[in-house]
Amino acid sequence: MELLPQSREALDEYVTASVDDVEGLLRVIEGWAVRSVPDCVALSVTLLDEDLTFTLVDQGATRPREGLDDRTTGHDAEPEQAYALDESGWADMAREAAFDGIASTVSLPVVEHGRAVLTIDLYASTAHAFRDRIDGLVEALGAWQAGAVTNADLSFDTLRRAELAPLRLREQRLVDVAIGLVAARMAVTTEDAATLLDRAAEEAGVTEGEAACVARVLLG
């Protein structure tokens, strides 16, 4: 699998004390995943505290499904037929909207000291790739068994989040600078400054990044 270009860009800028080597972590997970599930074609790791996602993907095996808007996905079915769908039926409907090349997924949270710190999402090219293999993956990856969820991301949404990671990092740097300016100007702690900035953004109906831009202009 290849590291998504946006993930490479984000990793070049990302520094954290909690995970020293994110790419190394991705490669370790890849090794376990591919050995356990040979049909695995992509994986994502989301660091929950930072809300950042990094992705490895087999570009030749996966791609967005074309013409999805023109496809019949079951929404035109008779109401009584729709309500009669069992779990297998809903899974089939989800696969209609899936990425080409992705037929099954599993999401595995990793918990430390009683709270989830990251999520591992694995993607496979066959519908039953994870059958009878989740227990082994949980043990190998140190994940939380009860939190494992299958086929929740057949649309490969973590790819979109990974593509946005560099932008999120740039926005976070902007917010950090604004927090420092607010703290210095108002003689408060950075924690209080962060609360003030968040409150100002909420009251103005803008994002925290947009509020940070205004703060930099006014206080910089």
Image (cartoon, rainbow, N blue to C red):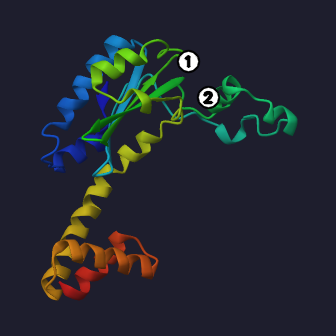
Q: Secondary structure at mark 1?
A: loop
Please state if 48 lies on the left or on the right of 102 as rendered: left
Q: Secondary structure at mark 2?
A: helix
Does any portion of residue 75 appear in the rendered image?
yes
Please state if 78 lies on the left or on the right of 143 as rendered: right
Q: Residue at position x 18%, y 49% from top?
A: 14
Query: Mark 1, residues whose alpha carbon is within 10 Å: few (<14), some, or many (≥20)?
Result: some
Amino acid type at circle 1 is Ala
Amino acid type at circle 2 is Arg
User: What residue did someone put label 2 on?
Assistant: 95
Q: Residue at position x 25%, y 30% from top?
A: 26
Residue 175: x, y in percent? 25, 69
Q: Of the numbered discs in the image, which one, if any, rests on residue 127?
A: 1
Please state if 81 lies on the left or on the right of 96 as rendered: right
**As displayed, is residue 56 above or below residue 201?**
above
Residue 97: x, y in percent? 62, 35
Gap in angstroms between the C-alphas marked 2 and 1: 9 Å
Q: Are marks 2 and 1 in contact (CB under 8 Å)?
A: yes
Residue 25: x, y in percent? 21, 31
112 or 8, which is in the foreground? Answer: 112
9 or 138, which is in the foreground? Answer: 138
Image quadrant containing the C terminus: bottom left
Residue 195: x, y in percent? 29, 74
Q: Earlier in the sequence, mark 2 or mark 1?
A: 2
Tell me where residue 87 sits by quadrant. top right
Does any portion of residue 78 appear in the rendered image?
no
